[in-house]
Image: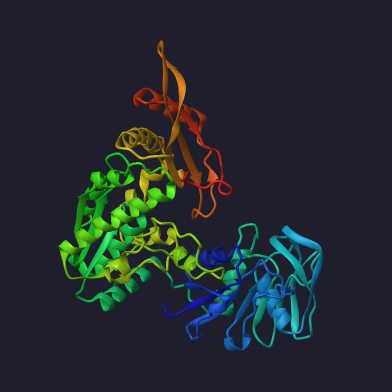
Amino acid sequence: MEEKILILDFGSQYTQLIARRIRELNIYCEIFPYNKTPKIKTNYMGIILSGSPYSVHDENAPFIDFNSFDNIPLLGICYGAQLIAKNNNCEIAKSKIREYGRAKLEFVDKENILMSGVKENSDVWMSHGDSITDIPSSFQVIASTKDVEITSYYLKDKNYYGLQFHPEVTHSDFGKVILENFTVKICGCSQSWTPDKFVEFTIESIKRTVMDDKVVLGLSGGVDSSVAAILIHKAIGDNLYCVFVDNGLLRKNEFDKVLSSYKNLGLNVKGVDSKNLFYKGLKGKSDPEDKRKSIGNDFIKVFEEEANKIGDIKWLAQGTIYPDVIESVSVKGPSATIKSHHNVGGLPEKMNLKIVEPLNLLFKDEVRRVGKSMNMPEIILNRHPFPGPGLGIRILGEVTKEKVDLLQQADDIFISSLVKRNLYDDVWQAATILLPVKSVGVMGDERTYEFTVVLRAVTSLDGMTADWSRLPNNFLADVSNEIINKVRGINRVVYDISSKPPATIEWE
């Protein structure tokens, strides 16, 4: 992993997308906030400056020391392009016409390496209120739109490039070509960042770091913790101790199913039935955050108890992935409210353990590819994301065993139906939510007064944004009918057609 592209984040909503596009080219890259720039070493083959909500004219506009970059190729995107320009005596003014959305390239310098293979009249995605209006002779215009002459430039003596559009979004027809031109043809990256290489590198790294020490990992059944477990197991074998806790808030029969699949993978795993402890802690609690804290605290109690039984544990393994890492060092600072169920909050400090996070370089889709390269079962790799508090935050109001039983039955019908109708893999996440309200219904000759459940299914790439899934009407009708007929206590089923934003994927 010697070759790297460094992405400096100035607060753009698209920064993670830049990284994803670079990774898709089999090139490893890292994101750092502009104000926490790492020491530039020879293994950084190139640097990309992101966009920003700021204008370069703002009094508190972000700025960087360009002298620290030596002779490394530089690509500025939107704000990044304007920052390079401002630092090199260009004029930047408020645009007479704000360019936002699609624009067409009217001129392309195909002789320039960055623009090689890019066609005129192709679409690019604009999002800027400032424009570079005048440039010295050291700059060369390499692309223009109708309204913005200096859409892209090349600073010849420094090997700097600028784009006033966003190549990372799919709306830019040749965006991927441009990014490949920069990283491969200009920076000289070999495109050797593959799942197999990552597995090889990570296993060796774990061996060197952990050596003969014992490691404990809390499994969730999800793809992140599962892939992390297999990687560590390949490195240290039975010195990895996995704990899978049944908090009573899993899906129907999930504890037995997941536990069985883990044992088939050869993992050293112990299942712990702690349902009663969690139900007791949740009694009387209806506030979502109170429920999360109760579930998190009880998990820590159980996990700590099991770790103490093993004895001589030196390391805590977690399935932390790269978006979590980026969020923690964001240019905007760590999130004000970290989800209380994220990983095992408070556990490392409480137990005085060192941390091993083998997936903290990867995005979610990369985690799945790594798992696939290790021949892990599709049933684990393609499993929908499931929140740490489980059904505890899909039961609005107080959680009781009776409500859990109701929701498990309804949820099982929904998920099983998605699988049977080959719709499961078309959905990023599916959930059933039990509302704390009852409504009137008629079943046979009897009037009923029973609970309502909500079906929620979304499509997404990473969960940051999501759209509601357009599931077939006949499918939803069949699921609704089956739930109402088979689950005594539910007489009404509704479907959530809200997107994120403004709604969240979960209801609490």
Compare residues 417 and 407 and report the one nearer the observer: 407
Judged left or right of residue 234, residue 319 is right
- How many numbered marks, from 0 up? 0
Residue sticking out furthest to the right: 96
Q: Judge whether residue 307 can be spotted in this image.
A: yes
Compare residues 360 and 193 and report the one nearer the observer: 360
Residue 471 point in image, percent of width and height: 50, 36
Quadrant in the rendering for residue 275: top left
Residue sticking out furthest to the front: 284
Residue 370 point in image, percent of width and height: 37, 62
* Color style of the picture: rainbow
Residue 282 point in image, percent of width and height: 33, 45
Residue at the spot 51% in from the left edge and 64% down from the top edge: 20
Q: Is residue 387 above or below residue 402?
A: below
Compare residues 117 and 491 and report the one nearer the observer: 491
Q: Judge whether residue 385 can be spotted in this image.
A: no
Q: Is residue 78 above or below residue 500?
A: below
Quadrant of the rendering where the N terminus is positioned: bottom left
Residue at the spot 37% in from the left edge and 53% down from the top edge: 293
Judged left or right of residue 246, residue 334 is right
Residue at the spot 48% in from the left edge and 41% down from the top edge: 457
Residue 315 point in image, percent of width and height: 26, 70
Q: Is residue 496 above or below residue 32?
A: above
Judged left or right of residue 86, residue 374 is left
Compare residues 176 and 252 and report the one nearer the observer: 252
Residue at the spot 59% in from the left edge and 70% down from the top edge: 179
